[in-house]
Every structure is written in structure tokens, then in C-alpha cells.
Image (tube, rainbow, N blue to C red):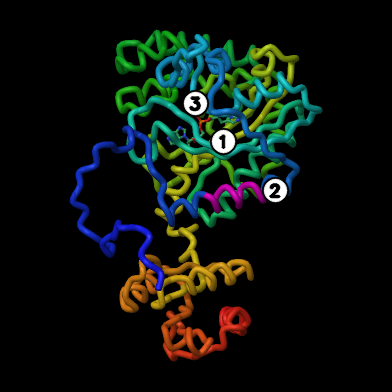
Amino acid sequence: MIRRHCSLVLPPSPVAWPFVPEFQTSPGMRDILPPESGRWRRFVAVFAELVEAAGYGQVIPPLLEDLGVFRRLGDATEIVTKEMYDFVDKGNRHVALRPEQTASVCRAFVQHRPLTPWKVWYAGPNFRYEKPQRGRYRQFEQVGVEVLGVDDPYLDVEVIALGWRFFEALGLRQVRLVLNSLGEPEDRARYVDALRRHFTEHLDALSPESRQTLDKNPLRVLDSKRHEDRAVIEAAPSIADYYSDDASSHFQVVQDGLRALGVPFEVEPRLVRGLDYYRRTTFEYQGATLDSAQNALGGGGRYDGLVEDLGGPPTAGIGFALGVDRTLLACDDEGVFAPPPGSVDVFVVDTTGGREALVLTEQLRAAGLRADRAYDQRSMKSQMKVADRSGASLALIVGTDELVAGTVVLRPLRGETREQTPVPRSEVIDVVKKALS
Ligand code: HAM
């Protein structure tokens, strides 16, 4: 008889937890527990499969970069000015946790000089010191793609359509694709001047927050969701009146391409995005079920000057990032892309001390089956409870009689019949495989 090797006996769960935790996650940071974590993994796997089939390879940049990398995102970008997790490290370097990954990808491009077109995808956490609320966190996850070195408007179409197809693959139906062009840098500059004039003329009607934003970046005033700003924003000039011929034809080709692929979109000339690096095409995927302040499931656009800003050659760039946290909230709202069901197929119950469970479970796993077992030499009843909770469809039971007879009892845990069948120990793997097929 094997003795218990540990004196700690955990009470059967669920239990009333009598402790007040001394530590909890920081505001805006979350633990993702099973089975939800299985859904996160599957989310990334579905994305990876889709984009790798389109020629994108994975890039894994570090979480931490020189602060300068993100400063290039622009002085008028709140993500940079207000929300950065930056600090001086032990080597006296001013570094920051990445608030997004486009700048890191461009830094990597300049550093490693890969051949173009460079088509990459990524997945991972980002950090922004924002006011936490549903759909807005300080650590959040993104998946995304970036393509460097291609100016072709049909690439814009490919990139935008990839994001759209991903939402389709998740089963989401209530997503809007909103599209805009910010024109060439000169068009954008003329438009920003016109906006500044317009908002300055109506300064009294603007909210104090928008007056402040106007000083730094008139484009961002268009983003205000404040009620008092609405009338002035509606009367503001439209970017569409400032396009050069090149910008206009690029935008027309993008729209035509999306129509050719049957991807529905709405042109929204007031769509500006939170980052300053965008030129020409910009877009956002908006979830209809989420609060308007957090309804962007993802977004992206062209950033043809960013590589140069990071010390590289003039290089065209386009990409998008999708928020995993928010997109999964939208999936919950629409009742699609549920967490995967129970994790194992077969559960071993052993009332003879646990050695048989140890060996049998290992054999089942080696045969490619998903198997788990009970521990701590609990009673048959308590082990069967754990077996039921495990989500397995079969239990294999070993008691003293079976050990002596060289058998194992097979018992279905789901369905109508719970009839127990003794199986010779040497045949158990084959019998289980057959029962599960
Ligand atoms: P972004 O619009 O800042 O763009 O973020 C993309 C998505 O990340 C958002 O639409 C949202 O779903 C999610 N997200 C952003 N902040 C939070 C937050 N605090 N909590 C939860 N989710 C959040 C970018 O990051 C660009 N790098 C996209 C891009 C790639 N543009 C070109 N290439």
C-alpha cells in the first residue's frame, strides 16, 4: 500500500474560501482562467491559420522597447503623451512597455532589413494606462498584420478583407467596416489647417476637453463623442474636399477592390484614428453590440512615413490590429465562438492507491488520448464526482477486484446508458479508442 506523500489534504471543491486575498490584479489587468484561456488560444490559432495561408509569417517583438521607438508615434498621440508605461531600467535606459506593435515591427524592419514585401503577423499583449472599463484595459491583447514595402492599393484591399474574413470565421455578424482616406501628407496638412480654422471660429461652442485637443491636434477633435461638440463637428470641413488626384484615385481603387471581393463597407470622412502615423487609407471594424466608446474591435491603415521616422529608408506600410479582449466580448454578445468544451475524453478512477491510475493515464496519453485522473486517494464517490466535472465522456475504474483480475471497468459518463463493462487490462486502450470514435 502506498502512503500519502503529502500531508496537505485539500477540501473537496467548490469550497467557501475563507481568505481575503492580500494581492489582486492591478486595475485594468486581468487573469484569463480556463476554460476562457482555451478560447484565447483558439482565437490566435484561427487568426494564424487565416493569415499564414495568405503568406504572412509571425514576428515576435519584445514587450519592451527603447522609449524613442514609441515617441515616433507622435507628440499629439495620447497613447504616447499620457498612457505609456515607461521607466528607466537598471542600465539607465529609458524604456517603455509597448502600447502597440506597429512601431516595434517597423523598428524590427529597420534593424533586420528583410526583403520586401515583408508580410508579418503578430499576437500579444500591449499596455496603455487608460481608465479601465468594460472593453478597455491597461493590459490588452492584439492580433495584427503589417506589410512593408508595397504601395499598391490592392494590398490595402487584401489587408482590410483579411480582417473582415477573420470576423466572419469567428461567426460575428454585427460588425461594420468603416473606411476613410486621410489623403497624402500635404492634403492632410491642408485639411488640418482648415479644421483648425473652423474649430477656432466656433471655439465657444466646443467642450473644454476639445478646446485642449484642438491646440495639439485638430483631427482628434473629430473623434470627440461629447454631446456639446456634435454640431460643430458636423459642420466641419470634409477631408474628401482636400484629396490630391493621387490620393483620390488610390482611395477609389481601394473601394472598388472591396466591392469586387464582396466586403461591405461604409465611407466615413470623419474617421480619424488615435495614432498620428496614418496616411491615405484608414479603417475600423466596429462592433454593433458594444458601447460606442469601446466599439472599435480593430483598426488600421497606411503609415508610409513611419519606417523613415525610425531611421529607415522611405517605405510604404499598412496593417491592422484587432483587440482580442473586445472581440471576445462581441462574441459573447452575439453568442458565437464559445469556449471549447471539457478538456479530457477519459478519466481514470483508482481506489487501490493511485499507482494503477498513474500508469494507465500515462498509457492513454501516449496513445494520443486526452486523459486525466483523481489524486489524493479519495473515496470512489468523491473520485467519480471529479470525473463527472472533468467533462470526460468515459471513466475507467480500477478497484481491488479489478487489480486482482487484471481488468478495468469502463463506464460512460454521458448519454442514457451508464452500463459498466469490464475490459481486460491489455485491451483497454483499443476499447477506449473504439468507444470514443
Ligand atoms: P488601435 O486602434 O490603437 O490601433 O488598437 C487596435 C485595437 O486594439 C482597438 O480597435 C481595440 O480593439 C484594441 N484596443 C486598443 N486599446 C485597448 C484597450 N485599452 N483595451 C482593450 N482593447 C484595446 C493600433 O494599435 C495600431 N497599431 C493598429 C495598426 C496596425 N495600424 C496599422 N497597423
Question: Which circle's residue, 2 or 3, is located before the other in the chain?
Answer: 3
Q: Is residue 377 magenta?
A: no
- The reply to whether callout 2 and callout 3 are in contact (CB within 8 Å) is no
User: Where does residue 386 sit, x and y in percent of width and height?
Assistant: 36, 70
Seen from this angle, which residue lies furthest right? 115
How many angstroms separate mark 1 from mark 3 (CA)?
12 Å
Quadrant containing the C terminus is: bottom right
Q: Nearer the viewer, residue 353 or 151?
A: 353
User: Where does residue 305 sit, x and y in percent of width and height?
Assistant: 66, 17
**Residue 256 showing in the rendered view:** no
User: Where does residue 315 sit, x and y in percent of width and height?
Assistant: 73, 20
Ligand 1 is within 8 Å of the C-beta of the residue at disc 3: yes
Q: Nearer the viewer, mark 2 or mark 3?
A: 3
The magenta stretch spans which residues? 41-49
Q: Is residue 42 magenta?
A: yes
Ligand 1 is within 8 Å of the C-beta of the residue at disc 1: yes
Q: Residues within 10 Å of mark 1 (few under 14, many from 20)?
A: many
Amino acid at dot 3: Pro
Amino acid at dot 2: Leu
On residue 238, the disc is: none
Quadrant containing the N terminus is: bottom left
User: In which quarter of the view is residue 200 placed?
Assistant: top left
Residue designated by label 1:
321
Q: Residues within 10 Å of mark 2 (few under 14, many from 20)?
A: few
Is 159 located above or below residue 250 in the figure?
A: below
Residue designated by label 2:
261
User: Could you say whether the residue bearing mark 2 is in a helix, strand or loop?
Assistant: loop
